[in-house]
Image (spheres, rainbow, N blue to C red):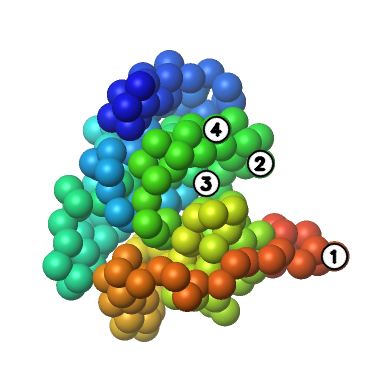
Amino acid sequence: MNSKEILTSIAEEVSICEECKLHHYREKGVPGEGPPNAEIVFIGEGPGFHENVQGRPFVGAAGEFLEELLETIDMRREDVFITNVVKCRPPGNRDPEPEELKACRGYLDRQLEAINPKVVVTLGRFSMARYIPGAKISQIHGRARRVNGLLVVPFYHPAAALHRPSLRSTVERDFAQLPELIKNPAQVPEYIHEKKEEKQAEQLSLF
């Protein structure tokens, strides 16, 4: 199968998935959307109310802000692939639980393998922790590194800037790096995770 066919197959699997309890709250699965040859993949946390209804990622206020940010680098939503670490809405927009993250892990891995993007942008703490465990987003946002062959750059979630307007300029500066990362990714260092004694959950801050 080609990349488009693989992504379509994954979307179909997500729509009927029962690998974790989130399927009980699902109106529509939200596998993600975008071109199969996208240069950038954005990975958020999980679908919210509007996403669950429409079956599309980032269609609320955070999605509108994401589209505004893309415009600042002369890109459109249609140019990038947007998805989440979990494909069904956690009830009450709570944080995804470990078994839910594990259940969806294979879907995301297969999506990235099919798309083979130049840059993976994590939005928020849960997608960041997928690739850079134990880190604090306030300390490493905007700092690209290679993780298992992927060029990963952690960003604040757009919702964080909506809740804390003081973060808006930081988010905009981080986004401004993307065109250069796409053109010149060679200098990005490999990330080496150092095992820490603290629990990962205790190290993650909300923003």
Labels 2 and 3 touching (C-beta < 8 A): no
Amino acid, disc 1: Glu
From mark 2 to mark 4, how far is it between C-alphas? Answer: 14 Å
- Residue at 53% in and 68% down: 145
* N-terminal-most mark, 2 or 4: 2
Circle 3: residue type: Arg
Q: Which residue is mark 3?
A: 94
**Circle 2 residues within 10 Å: few <14, some 14–19, many ≥20:** few
Question: Looking at the image, do the residues carrying marks 3 and 1 touch, with CB atoms under 8 Å apart?
Answer: no
As shown in the figure, which amino acid type bears the numbered disc 4? Gly
Q: Is residue 161 above or below residue 129?
A: below
Residue at numbered disc 1: 197
Looking at the image, is mark 3 or mark 1 earlier in the sequence? 3
Q: Quadrant of residue 89?
A: top left
Say whether residue 9 is left or right of residue 21: left
Query: Which residue shows up at 66% across the image and 41% down it?
Result: 98
Q: From the top left corner, tell me how far across and down residue 192 is, in percent.
A: 69, 66
Measure how far apart labels 2 and 3 are at the Cα level: 12 Å
**Earlier sequence position, callout 4 versus callout 3:** 3
Residue at image mark 4 = 106
Q: Amino acid at mark 2?
A: Pro
